[in-house]
Image: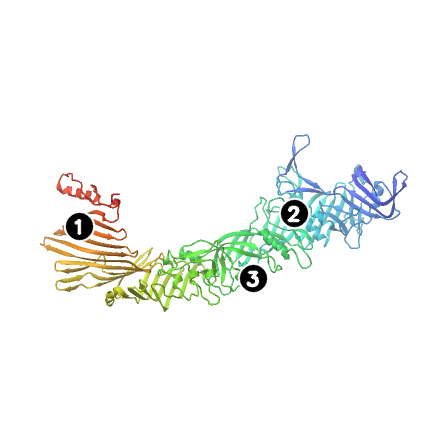
Amino acid sequence: MGSVLLIRPTDHLLVGVRWTGFTTSGVDGAGVPVLTAGDQARLILLFPPQHVGEECSPPASAAPLSLPAGSTGSMVPGWRAVLSGSSRISIDVPPGRRIALTATAILDAVGNVPLVVSSGVPGADETAIELPWRVLLAPGAHTQAGAVVCRHPSAPVSAGEVSGLWRTRLVDAAQSPTSAAPDARLALRVADPVLADAADPAFGPQAPNNTLALPRSARTRLALETNNRPATATRLELSSFGGTLYAAGAWPGFEWEQQTALGRDMKVRARFEGVMYPLGHQAEYLEVVTREFDAHTTAGGAAVLRRIGILTIVEPTRREPAADATRRRFPLGDVEITQTTFTDIASPNSAVPGAAWRMTALPGIGTQATHFRPTTSTGEPVLFPIRCATGDADATFAMPLLFVARIPIDQTSTSLTDPGLAQRLAADYGTAQVRFAPTPVDLTGARARGPGDVHEVHGVTIAGIAQQADLTGGYRPALTQLEIALPALRVLRGDAQLSSVRFTEKYLRNGAEDVLLEMLPNQVREIDFAKGADKSGGLVAPKYVANAISRTLGPVNLQAMPNPATGLIDPAALFPSDQAALLGFPLKSLLTQLRVPPEITAIPKAGAPPEVRMQWRGVTLRSTGPFVARPSTRLDLSVTASAERNETVCSVKDFTLELPPGPKRVLRLTFATLTFAQRDGSGPDVAVDGVDAEFLGELKLLDKLRDVADLGAAGKLLDVSPRGVAVRYSLPLPPVAAGAFVMRNIAFTAGIDIPFNGDPVGVALGFASRANPFQLSVLMFGGGGYLEIQLGRDGLKRLEASLEFGAFVAVDFVVASGEVHALGGVRYTLESSGAVALTGYLRIGGCVDVLGLISVSIELCLSLSYQSERNALVGRATVVIEIDLTLWSDSVELDSGEWVLAGAPGRRLMARDTDAALARWREYRSAFAGPRREQPPLAAATTESHQQ
């Protein structure tokens, strides 16, 4: 083996020469050594680097460097570059061929001789041309039987005093050497895929958008494609100043074009076909690098490489999938990317964070650049505008996507059908959370819509499908989470909170499943009407936790669904709280043979708000505590709220309340129907039909009142407040007179309190009342009294009874009249806690009236009470004086407050000399009595709290 360096300054020839299989056979006439070829002689020409891999940058961007211009003190813009490795061409020399070691003889020996080109990775003595950087080309002829030769002048070519640059042109041997501008007709193959996969140079963080003209992603793809079908070169030349290459190639999914002159790129174009992940729209990414005289202030007019990247959506609209299983995962209909061209794209070959191509090992073809996340030049993900045609309305939003290149693997498959890449894409993409205007979306696409098929969607979380069963139809997205509103709860409870839900696995496997959505573990919703029973029919207050949404029932609890064997729901599982009640009785104790929970749904209406419905019909009840049910006892609830009407009707049929519960019951109330109704914004109405009261046990003596106290016919007073509805019935009886005996002011009263806060329904019965007692008189003697009973779910809540008797004396002299009275009585009170209060009192008073113009009255009340809770004997005294002078009236009340006579300590009789009421009385008296005289302190009784 030998070598020499050929240097010819005239035409800038600078090549190395290496040979094998030669012997030295003397010298020629000029004394130059001569080589004689043996049997396997080979001659190799070695060229300096044929390509400069220059830094290219986005249009109008500043120069990355500023370098000193020699010793001038000024600065010039600079761009970085890397040199390719050396190149070589190799020929076989026939045995016996003599070659003098001169430039002319060696170049003449190499010209028009077929080059030695390897079909694999070139060896050290085989032709290999690195042009462009890290792309090792093995040139071939256009025809399989053809050969590649190099053509060049052996001596300098001059015109006058100017000599041309020496270069050798590689062409198909079949091409005519006399053509003025011959097409080289070369087939190019990238001979070393490992070298093509070398990492690109890092140009530094100060210019993250700058790249090579032909980066790693394009080089590896070029190596793959040219080994299946070579690219075509119309010009390939080598020189000591660099190589010249005009080449192009087009393959399924990839195109490449290269124009390089003397080692400097003029134009590089690479186009990748692919799809947008996870939506699956067909797209292409085009990157073009051109040399331009740049007018940017920092470029100084230099001819620099500028790069532009264009992402084009070639399939703007993608139809929904035909497969039901895939459609169930993404029920948003046809998907359109409304903008089709994106130019502000950071090169996926640059150092912009998050923008780079991801390299993936594909089966059978090695590592390739498979996908990247389109990113702006500032490092922000590109947000693609999306419109989904959901059928009822369009959902519009923006989301990031991945570009995935379509790379052939074999005759039938590509990278887009590779399951391994699909799994990596799902991991690399993750999820995209998007929000949009509230949009009604049919989540099932069923031919017959159920009440819970259409939901008001406010946002979705989109992901790819890692285990997509069939990738031949392209990538499809999946909704991993939805943000939905529940209009029914918003209308019924004022609950506007959004719910985070996802499709149930059962539904995804079988579209006929009823439970469509399940709420995320930390997003369960409490449906609580305990504090607002008027919204759920007044009589019933459901309270339960919903963690799923049924297509037919609305919000449901997965742990309280019908038993598959019996079809029945466990009431305790559905309504575990005692606050979930009907008439104050826990629903879990009342319900039996329960087959469905309350149905709470919103039915979409075209051009109008949805119609909200809450229905629970034919619910069977059983006896519990004082609630006595019959086989026909039923609960019916219907709530409808829409733009046309608002109606709430709840009724409980055929039931009895026995109070208190147990063997000591004293009252039985039987109801044919108890109905709560409210319609179109009017106040609520409570109707009691077929009610019958029967006194039992110790109150059996009052049972005779039933003959005259038909509650259904009695006068009804309805009191509606935000706290509930109170129904009062009052049946006055005529006075009873027999001689001097008169009994009047007799009335039987009854009431039903229906709270809206979930408290038990209360029943009140009375004979007269404390405010209006019955009156009994015999001549000048008289008295009165009342009896009031309050009953609740757990029995007696309060019992109060009072009787009093005394004397009344009245006189009338036409111009003046007056009366005096003295009454004594006793009052007995029993609370539900068992506390007892027994009070004895004396009332003394009278009044005088003159011509109806002046009246004066005075009332003194002395009381003595025993209070069991305090175990105390408590006294109290009050004096009330009223004066009416026609145009002026006033009253003064003197109250001693309570004082403890015996028993519990802490409240004793104390002296005082100031009292607001007493001061008013003194002021009034002084107006009639002249100048005020000082009064001695008045001993009065008061409590500590009254002093404060």
| Spatial CA span between label 3 and label 1 | 88 Å
Residue underneath mark 1: 860
Q: Is residue 600 visible?
A: no
State the residue position of label 2.
288
The mark nearer the N terminus, 3 or 1, is: 3
3 and 1 marks in contact (CB < 8 Å): no
Count the labels in the image.
3
Q: Which residue is mark 3?
A: 325
**Around disc 1, counting alpha carbons within 10 Å, would you say few (fewer than 14), some (14 to 19), or many (20 or more)?**
some
Mark 2 and mark 3: Cα distance apart in space? 41 Å
Residue type, label 1: Leu
Where the N terminus falls, by quadrant? top right
Q: Position of residue 501 (x, y in %)?
A: 49, 56
Which tag, 1 or 2, sits closer to the chain's start?
Answer: 2
Q: Residue furthest left?
A: 813
- Estimate the x, y position of residue 869 in percent, counting from the top left: 28, 52
Q: CA distance from mark 1 to mark 2?
A: 109 Å
Left or right for 456, reference 839: right
Assign a secondary structure to mark 2.
strand
Where is residue 243, by image quadrant?
top right
Closer to the camera: disc 1 or disc 2? 1
Q: Is residue 212 visible?
A: yes
Secondary structure under the numbered disc 3 in the rendered image = helix
Disc with the residue nearer the chain's start (2 vs 3)? 2
Q: Is residue 709 left or right of residue 304?
A: left
Mark nearest the camera among 2 and 3 is 3
